[in-house]
Amino acid sequence: MPHPARARLAGVLTLSLVSVPSLLGAVGCARTTLADSGGVCAVDGLHLVRPGRLVIATERPASEPWFTNDDPANGQGFEAAVAYAVAERLGFRRDDVTWVGAPSDPTSMPGRRNFDFDIDQVAITAERSRAVTFSDSYYTVNQAVVAMASSRIAPAGTIVELRKARLGAQAGTTSLAVIQQVVRPVIAPTVLPDTSAAEQALRSGRVDGIVVDLPTAFQLTSTKIEGAKIVGQLESADAAAEQLGLVFEKDNPLVGCVNQALAELRNTGELQRLEDTWLADSVGAPHLP
């Protein structure tokens, strides 16, 4: 199901994991950064709102599992971890990063900004790109199976175990396509008109589970459907799967260096490790093989 442009999720983590700066620090001292190569990506050559500092925005409260304890500066949670990993690749120390509050919709804020980029589960779209500049994607939104904890599919650990389930999804969505193309259930999926209908179908037992995008799954299980759980994540087979990007002031040249940093994080596998840590392992949303 299409999730809100910005998922505002209630806390779902009860674990306290090691901060990502600590995870990266063990190898960070031996790692070269973009700044080491000099030129436009050296810290003193970057286009910044505050010379020598990286100012990052996110909406408050900063929700889990994207952040933890409403404290972006602790480096915990997926988006906090990504932000600090990017900062490190650009050559910033942890205490060179400043966090500020962001408007409820950073893609509609006109003119100059008081931050270098915003990280806040913002989906990249052509329409939004007319008003702001997006980085390359730092996360492809997976789909997730949500079931009541009492459901027969709640313990499922593989896609095969879902094939005989009654699954539902909203009409015309990536979620429905994933049921059809990835799960390939024996029983034709129940096609539902909207999110409310999907919630009701799950509560009433009309379906064993529903498939929604992962941010919506966090929202449903933490604030909307008592007794519901995320069974697991499904990777989309759809090339049009939603992508999340960092938001910059239109035509901000800083985006070029940030994209280089993201490419390095992706190529070294760090982005995937951060995703596995914060959006799968710590929140009980495993990838379903």
Image (cartoon, rainbow, N blue to C red):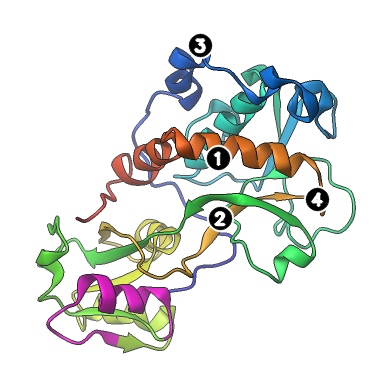
The reply to whether discs 4 and 2 touch (Cβ–Cβ < 8 Å) is no
Residue depicted at x 40% and y 23%: 18
Q: Is 177 in the magenta?
A: yes
The mark closer to the camera, 4 or 3, is 3
Residue situated furthest top in the rendering:
29
* Relative height, residue 225 to residue 283 (above, below): below
- Left or right, residue 173 beside residue 4: left
Residue depicted at x 37% and y 28%: 17
Residue that mark 2 sits on:
244
* Relative height, residue 182 to residue 245 (above, below): below
Q: CA distance from mark 1 to mark 3?
A: 19 Å
Residue that mark 1 sits on:
263
Kind of residue at badge 4: Glu
- Left or right, residue 106 beside residue 51: left
Q: CA distance from mark 4 to mark 3?
A: 33 Å
Which element carries disc 4, helix, strand or loop? loop
Residue 40 pos. (x, y %)? 79, 30
Q: CA distance from mark 2 to mark 3?
A: 30 Å
* Relative height, residue 244 to residue 20 (above, below): below
Q: Earlier in the sequence, mark 4 or mark 3?
A: 3
Residue depicted at x 48% and y 73%: 2
Kind of residue at badge 3: Ala
Q: Is 262 in the magenta?
A: no
Which element carries disc 1, helix, strand or loop? helix
Q: Earlier in the sequence, mark 4 or mark 2?
A: 2
Q: Earlier in the sequence, mark 2 or mark 3?
A: 3
